[in-house]
Image (tube, helix red, strand yellow):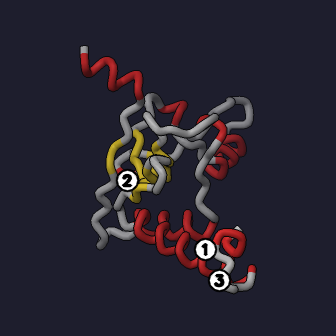
């Protein structure tokens, strides 16, 4: 890939992969700090968004709490949900914002952080000494309602 475009520069595939990995980790560190990163070639932006659940049932389930409730009340079917007190009840997740971008079949492309990066984001969210100023995500349906 790189060697085909730049024949005068000789770099091994391993070194090229190391460079890409270092750049990607640097970008993810910037995103976790709360900044949006604009992607080249009009591919959109990568950022962290906070989403307020529409109802309790759309909140993440607490499987450990549900198991304890089933042991306590075997005849009832209770489900426990996470409150997300450390984020004021919001669900924080990484998003690739592709709205209005020139990308064929963009609905098939997704963004997933690696597990260590998600744990780093969780540690940042749970640390009370760090101010987490992530943007609130507003779905398209709600944006259209606001314009009316």
Tell which circle, 1 or 2, labels the residue nearer the N-terminal end. Answer: 1
Q: Alpha-carbon distance for marks 3 and 2?
A: 51 Å
Q: Position of residue 127 (x, y in %)?
A: 38, 70
Answer few, some or many: residues within 10 Å of disc 2's Cα (few below 14, many 20 plus, some between 14 and 19): some
> In the depicted view, which residue is nearer to us: 45 or 8?
8
Figure check: 106 above or below 5:
above
Q: Alpha-carbon distance for marks 1 and 3?
A: 20 Å
Which of labels 1 and 3 is toward the front? 3
At horizontal 34% and vertical 61% (from top left) the residue drawn is 35
Contact between marks 1 and 2 (CB within 8 A): the answer is no
Numbered badge on residue 88: none
At horizontal 42% and vertical 63% (from top left) the residue drawn is 31
Q: Which residue is mark 2?
A: 87
Which of labels 3 and 2 is toward the front? 3
Answer few, some or many: residues within 10 Å of disc 3's Cα (few below 14, many 20 plus, some between 14 and 19): few
Q: Position of residue 121 (x, y in %)?
A: 48, 65
Answer few, some or many: residues within 10 Å of disc 1's Cα (few below 14, many 20 plus, some between 14 and 19): few
Numbered badge on residue 20: 1
Q: Which residue is mark 3?
A: 8
- Report helix, strand or loop for mark 1: helix
Q: Alpha-carbon distance for marks 1 and 2?
A: 32 Å
At horizontal 33% and vertical 54% (from top left) the residue drawn is 134
- Report helix, strand or loop for mark 3: loop
Contact between marks 1 and 3 (CB within 8 A): the answer is no
């Amino acid at each position: 890939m790189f060697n085909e475009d730049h024949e005068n520069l000789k770099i091994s595939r391993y070194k090229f992969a190391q460079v890409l990995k270092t750049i990607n980790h640097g970008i993810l560190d910037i995103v976790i700090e709360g900044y949006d990163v604009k992607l080249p070639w009009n591919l959109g932006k990568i950022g962290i968004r906070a989403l307020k659940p529409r109802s309790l049932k759309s909140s993440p389930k607490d499987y450990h709490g549900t198991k304890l409730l089933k042991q306590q009340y075997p005849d009832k079917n209770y489900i426990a949900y996470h409150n997300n007190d450390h984020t004021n009840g919001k669900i924080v997740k990484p998003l690739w914002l592709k709205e209005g971008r020139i990308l064929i079949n963009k609905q098939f492309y997704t963004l997933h952080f690696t597990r260590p990066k998600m744990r780093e984001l969780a540690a940042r969210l749970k640390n009370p000494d760090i101010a987490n100023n992530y943007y609130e995500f507003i779905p398209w349906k709600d944006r259209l309602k606001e314009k009316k």
